[in-house]
Image (cartoon, grey):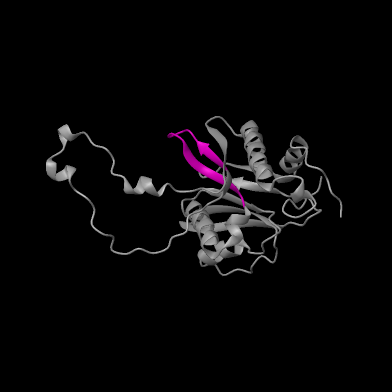
Amino acid sequence: MALQDHFRPPLSTRRHWHSFHNAWSTYIADDLNQSLPEGYFAEPNAQFGIEIDVAAFSERIPVNPVHQTSEILEWKPSSPTATVPFQLTTDVVEVQIFSTQTGPTLVGAIELISPANKDRPGQRSAFTSKCQTYLTQGIGLIIVDIVTILSANLHNELINRLNLVIEPLDARLYAVAYQVGQKNGSPYLDFWQEALAIGGNLPILPLFLKGGLYLPIHLDMTYQYTCVRQRIPEFND
């Protein structure tokens, strides 16, 4: 089954895209867990419309009064120096790969972009900021964008955030793999980019885990498997 448009009719009226993304991340993680060596594991992480409990930030953590003076018990923070708007990431659809050699340590991530990630400048900035953090920590990264209803290219925005001077990727749909390495004491960033198209196949991309291990990510195989298992109808143009 070739790549379909999960965000426009007729498919969008038959199936929910977020359910598909959730299932796809699960099957990618399952496929990874069949091939990762001992000491590594993959977990899906799908959250939509994340809301922060503001009250939780306003309530003081209970303390044991036996070990606290009256001065500490009555202490409250002063007014903040500044208050400015801040955008949190509201959608997360990813597969995280961990190493257990020194406790669960994140060594790789596969991000399935959602419409909310592309919707507004603040959301795009939050997403690219997370990707930048992964890369600056040497964590392997793949991003996959099959969202057809918004045109922002988050790979290009990530490259701009990293202050890299390269030719932008001229594609609305794409998948990109990133590897952070080092040669002669100097860090470098390799990436493999693939333009995607509705009706086409998805590529195999390398996922480079922090520490040197790499393995192929069969996007097309897991996509087709997800479509079959989720009983996604096939529509031909």
Q: Is residue 100 magenta?
A: yes
Q: Residue at x 51, y 67 (%)?
A: 163
Q: Position of residue 68 (x, y in %)?
A: 16, 38
Question: Is 8 included in the stretch rendered in magenta?
Answer: no
Give the magenta-colored segment's residue range. 95-113
Seen at 68% across and 56% down, the residue is 147
Picture coordinates of residue 46, whole percent (x, y)? 58, 42
To which quarter of the image does residue 82 belong?
A: bottom left
Quadrant assignment for the C terminus: bottom right
Q: Nearer the viewer, residue 190 or 80?
A: 80
Q: Is residue 48 left or right of residue 78?
A: right
Reply above or below: 65 against 151.
above
Furthest residue in direction top, as rendered: 38
Q: Main secondary structure of the magenta part?
A: strand
Up the image or down, 127 lies above or below 17; here it is below
Provide residue 76's location: percent of width, then percent of height.
22, 50
Considering only vertical position in the picture, is 188 above or below 51?
below
Give residue 75's position: percent from left, percent from top. 19, 48
Q: Is residue 110 left or right of residue 227?
A: left
